[in-house]
Amino acid sequence: MLPRQRHIFLNRYRLRRSLTIGTILTLLFYHPFTGKEALSIGMLAALVVDAVLFFKTSWSMDYAQTKALFDHERLRPGLLIKSTVAINFLGLGVMSLCVSDLGSKQPVLPEDLRIFIYFVSILLIWISLHHGYAMHYAKIFFHVNADRDDAENAESATKVFSFPDDRRPVLFDFLYVAYAIGMTFGMTDVGAQSTEIRKVVLAQAMLAFLFATTAISAIASLFTA
């Protein structure tokens, strides 16, 4: 497995990178702008870097690279729960911050620009939520198939997901699954073939619906404030 891929996809590295970028930019912009504006700029930059790296690298990964990424990663459902709760609290924090910041009497940035920053931040937090589920689905898939040889992969894959034409999935396929659930609250042409997966899919769909309705309310308040 390439070290670069580990640093792009695994949560512990993503968290360090985001905290580093966010902290540096917040401190850098603290004096020219208000504290809330500097914090929002740092947070947006960290989210943008994370999303761009995730998409750019996963776009070109093949099956062998995807398998190598997850072969030695332990399946830890508790980590998914913790990261999901953390992301949702981050989303609620951003929504609260934007409402508070728009009521500020001494802003430096134009109001339209501040609204844009918060709007994009909420969108990127929603994206990060589904990235976590995509990684979890991939971990489950390769965990189930860890002790199978390549000749049996197509047969054993039906125990987790059924991909069209029994094809070998790459990381982008799991992103597709996660986004499909997040936007349609259900499966598409990829089938969930186990009770364990259906439970995770249901949890993701419910959280996506809750986050989306809350975000829509927050965004509506931005444009009507």
Image (cartoon, rainbow, N blue to C red):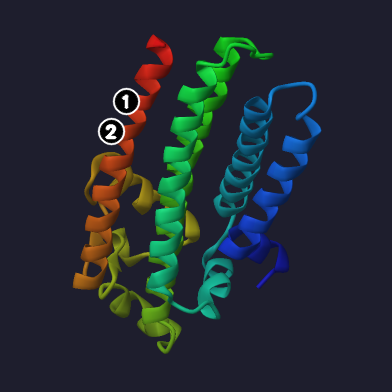
Q: Nearer the viewer, residue 107 or 78?
A: 107
Q: Nearer the viewer, residue 64 or 165?
A: 64
Which quarter shows the C terminus? top left
State which quadrant residue 69 falls in: bottom right
Residue 100 in view, yes or no: yes
Please give the count of numbered marks on the rendered protein: 2
Residue 10 in view, yes or no: no
Q: Residue at x 56, y 53 (%)?
A: 58
Which quarter shows the N terminus? bottom right
Indicate the secondary structure of the residue bearing disc 2.
helix
**Residue 109, image x, y percentages:** 66, 14
Instruction: State how far apart marks 2 and 1 are (Cα).
Output: 6 Å
Look at the picture and state if 142 lies above or below 89: below
Give the labeled residue for mark 1.
217
**Residue 136, image x, y percentages:** 41, 65
* Residue at the farthest left position: 195
Look at the picture and state if 221 lies above or below 188: above
**Residue 166, image x, y percentages:** 32, 66
Give the labeled residue for mark 2.
213
Kindly indicate whether the residue at mark 1 contacts the one at mark 2 (C-beta within 8 angstroms). Answer: yes
Q: Residue at x 52, y 26 (%)?
A: 118
Q: Nearer the viewer, residue 222 or 185?
A: 222
Disc 1 marks a residue whose amino acid type is Ser
Q: Nearer the viewer, residue 176 or 164?
A: 176
Crowd tier of the residue under label 2, counting other residues whose Cα lies within 10 Å: few below 14, some 14–19, many 20 or above: few
Lateral position of residue 199 relative to residue 17, left or right: left
Crowd tier of the residue under label 1, counting other residues whose Cα lies within 10 Å: few below 14, some 14–19, many 20 or above: few
Indicate the secondary structure of the residue bearing disc 1.
helix
Disc 2 marks a residue whose amino acid type is Thr
